[in-house]
Image (cartoon, coloured by chain):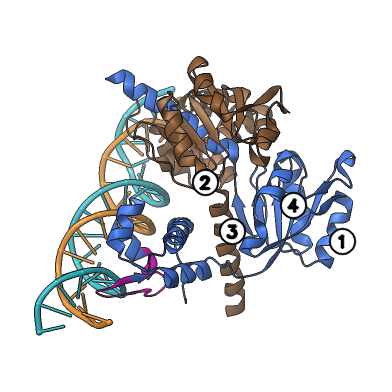
Chain colours: A brown, B blue, C orange, D cyan
Amino acid sequence: MEDKNISQAVISRLPRYLRYLGELKDSNVERISSQELSELMKVTASQIRQDFNNFGGFGQQGYGYKVSYLYDEIAKILGINKTHHLIIVGAGNLGQALANYMNFERRGFHFKGIFDSNEALYGKKIRDMYVQPMNEMEAFVKENDIDIAVLTIPKTGAVKVAEQLVNCGVKAFWNFAHVDLNVPDDIVVENVHLSDSLMRLSYNITQSYEEKEDK
Amino acid sequence: MEDKNISQAVISRLPRYLRYLGELKDSNVERISSQELSELMKVTASQIRQDFNNFGGFGQQGYGYKVSYLYDEIAKILGINKTHHLIIVGAGNLGQALANYMNFERRGFHFKGIFDSNEALYGKKIRDMYVQPMNEMEAFVKENDIDIAVLTIPKTGAVKVAEQLVNCGVKAFWNFAHVDLNVPDDIVVENVHLSDSLMRLSYNITQSYEEKEDK
DNA sequence: TAGATTGTTAATCGATTAACAATC
DNA sequence: TAGATTGTTAATCGATTAACAATC
């Protein structure tokens, strides 16, 4: 697993591999060849073998890959066994939905607290957690060794809050705010820009309609 | 705008351009050069010019780009002016959050209805809409010319529901279900796999910790 | 052993960056 | 006109696919 510089393109495909392998495991499939997996996932077998070989050989010539072993290895690469402490900043619709809907714990993310600047929400129970005021966030983050913050606040405050959190020791952001965070290079940021996604959808619909008209 | 085959890499960057141009417009910046924009957005000026030129020339030699014109053109390319009729399928946490949180109307997406199979939710008011039972969905889609469905249902039902909706005339999916839809090639699917995103975050954190240990 | 399939090298394809001529 | 900056061609880089030798 001495992986140096794996491209983000490869990383982005790993969760999908994991999903398919999980399903195969559930269906009690023991072994699979890159050829079979490629037909299932609609990617080339070549790509599959290249991707896996970025991390060392998980297969066996003449046999293929053992599903459960491959699954475990990819899970390990993705760091799913590691434990992280996470807070949600912003207890609006989206923050609440993520708290309830994402199964954080299953992936080693321990949900430790949720914060909002809106007084009306203070003390509101979300999952088994009470919404706390923003001015208690700094102390909480330091005390509880929080390393990840989920940002579900409006873009106006997001950049500043992120800087504040970095100063308290937060190492990574799952950023739903529609803005680019301004954080040091060693801080990890995974952006989920839903409106960007919606615009891509919009573009592709427009395209597909125009193509039809052309005919 | 006679664009043939623009790569998805380019398309994915357009919403970000639009965001920055919107901010520049709000700050009353009239013109900008690819050089200035590149410094602001931390991408190469070359890429910016290449990206824009996929759609024809929006700039002027010796001057740069007129912010408001460029903004409008990109908005047009993304099809933001077009009108679409949209339903949300799945009125759980995520479905409700999207209904309340996404400003669908601002991007030409008219939110027309929300459906769920859970009886307990029938009639519940979300935004200005009442949750309807799934068995009324087909008729509703046909009657109201729905062309987009947002899928916020568990993955178990998603594939079947998508097929059903395609048969009723739905042309595009914004898919939050953690599964690959099985739909014809001319149907547009934009996936938002939140748990994949969380795994990428997990991987990158693990990597960044390991790098530090190496030193 | 023979057949199958990986791991890996080589070839191709596409996307990004650099360079510069066109032109406002 | 001279200077600036685009639009576009050419060079480079990286990612994907193809091919095949290694080996189970």
Residue at the spot of label 3: A201
Q: Residue A23 placed where, x, y %?
A: 65, 33
Label annotation for residue B151: none
Q: Residue at x 43, y 40 (%)?
A: A10
- In the rendered image, which quarter is residue A102 located in? top right
Relative to the observer, which residue lies in front, B127 or C16?
B127
Query: What residue is pinned by disc 4?
Result: B88
Q: Residues within 10 Å of mark 1 (few under 14, many from 20)?
A: few
Q: Do marks 1 and 2 share a chain?
A: no
Residue A195 in percent (x, y) is at 57, 53
Which amino acid is tagged 1? Answer: Ala
The Cα atoms of the two marked residues, 4 and 2, are separated by 25 Å
The reply to whether the magenta stretch includes residue A6 is no
Sequence-first disc among 4 and 1: 4
The answer to whether residue B112 is above or below residue A76 is below
* In this view, the mark in front (4 or 2): 2
In magenta, the rendered stretch is: B51-64
Residue A163 % position (x, y):
42, 34
Label 1 to label 3: alpha-carbon separation? 24 Å
- Residues at marks 3 and 2 touching, judged by CB atoms closer than 8 Å: no
> Given contact means CB atoms under 8 Å apart, are the residues at marks 4 and 2 in contact?
no
What number is the disc on residue B139?
Answer: 1
Badge 2 amino acid: Lys
